[in-house]
């Protein structure tokens, strides 16, 4: 479909016969196509009297209602040195096809196939446009509601530092969805950060060493119990193996970001430690990013502020297990929002 004009009376699209012998400017309006009597004469290759007679029979027999299938369109025509406005009858696809069946025109069949495809594409494009507008309206409302909530809680001192961090993450997540929506529809001048291909695994020994170092640092500040980092069976080993697993020869989680996000989620939700699962999950999340050179943004700033990571850990801990994919998307979108 190649629109060349768009007016209040509808959109103009081109029909060209496969043999290239005719080319018609077809009006598309109200989810159907319209041709004038002269255009139908050209399409079917019959005299005007023949086409007119078939139209009279179509309406006279009650096969179609004239009021539903005929429209009057004002057309500007040049007659000598002056332009004259003529009222031209136009017939919709139902009437065009009824005449086409009567004259048994091969070109009529070609037009029917073209019109069906054109109308389908037009409806789908319109649906896609409306769907995008609805999604954008929904995003606007979400962002406004979260912003209002954040302002209200903050102004009335009803939120802690951790709670404020959670609100910041939710606001950032809503913004990241808008960026991804615009990127998907080629409405962003530049693409968001692309996922990184893993180059290093987080081994069990490396994870345990990082946990020991964290426990030592927290112990110096008297912020841990003796149960912090104590493993439950082989669960940690199972989590680290699971993020590296493959299916049919392909990685189940192909990017650094996806594997780091799943480490964070699995450690927090599966409780592989007697105590400290949220803090250890956050630690291993950052460690996996660090090992694969993905800890910093393009401007060398950290991809996650401490407060944002605390908020993510709290959100994951409180989330319903059935919302796993939602939480993973939150993490991935925040990682992709390189301007955050």
Image (cartoon, helix red, strand yellow):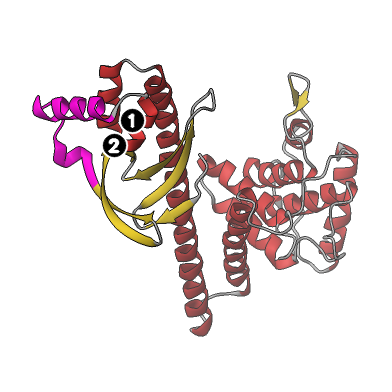
Q: Which mark is residue 37?
A: 2
- Circle 2 crowding by C-alpha within 10 Å: few under 14, some 14–19, many from 20: some
Q: Is residue 18 magenta?
A: no
What residue sits 25% from the left and 31% below the top? 95
Quadrant containing the C terminus in the rendered view: bottom right
- In the displayed structure, 59 sits above or below 85; it is above
Residue at point 78% right, 20% down? Answer: 249
Residue denoted by label 1: 41
Name the one closer to the observer, 125 or 292.
125
- Direction front: furthest residue: 80
Marks 2 and 1, how far apart in space?
6 Å
Residue span colored magenta:
48-71
- Tag 2 and tag 1, C-beta contact below 8 Å: yes
Residue 85 visible (yes or no): yes
Q: Residue 81 lies in what quarter of the image?
A: bottom left
Q: Secondary structure at mark 1?
A: helix
């Amino acid at each position: 479909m190649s629109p060349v004009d768009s007016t209040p009376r509808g959109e103009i699209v081109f029909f060209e016969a496969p043999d290239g012998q005719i080319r018609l400017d077809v009006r598309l309006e109200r989810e159907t196509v319209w041709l004038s009597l002269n255009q139908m004469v050209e399409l079917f290759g019959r005299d005007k009297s023949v086409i007119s007679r078939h139209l009279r029979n179509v309406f006279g027999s009650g096969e179609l209602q004239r009021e539903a299938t005929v429209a009057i369109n004002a057309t500007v025509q040049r007659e000598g040195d002056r332009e004259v406005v003529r009222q031209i009858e136009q017939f919709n696809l139902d009437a065009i096809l009824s005449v086409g069946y009567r004259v048994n025109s091969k070109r009529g069949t070609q037009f029917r196939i073209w019109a069906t495809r054109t109308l389908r594409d037009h409806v789908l494009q319109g649906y896609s446009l409306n769907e995008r507008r609805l999604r954008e309206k929904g995003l606007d409302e979400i962002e406004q509601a979260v912003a209002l909530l954040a302002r209200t809680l903050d102004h009335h001192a009803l939120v802690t530092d951790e709670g404020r961090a959670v609100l910041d993450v939710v606001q950032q997540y809503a913004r990241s969805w808008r960026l991804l929506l615009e990127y998907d529809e080629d409405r962003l001048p530049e693409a968001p950060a692309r996922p990184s291909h893993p180059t290093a695994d987080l081994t069990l020994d490396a994870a345990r060493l990082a946990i020991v170092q964290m426990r030592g640092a927290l112990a110096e500040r008297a912020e841990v119990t003796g149960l912090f980092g104590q493993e439950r069976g082989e669960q940690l080993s199972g989590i680290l193996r699971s993020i590296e697993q493959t299916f049919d020869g392909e990685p189940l989680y192909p990017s650094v970001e996806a594997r780091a996000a799943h480490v964070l989620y699995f450690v927090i939700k599966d409780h592989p430690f007697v105590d400290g699962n949220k803090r250890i999950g956050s630690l291993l999340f950052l460690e996996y990013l660090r090992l694969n050179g993905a800890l910093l943004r393009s401007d060398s700033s950290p991809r996650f502020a401490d407060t944002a990571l605390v908020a993510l850990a709290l959100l994951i801990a409180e989330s319903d297990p059935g919302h796993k994919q939602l939480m993973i998307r939150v993490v991935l979108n925040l990682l992709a929002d390189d301007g955050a």
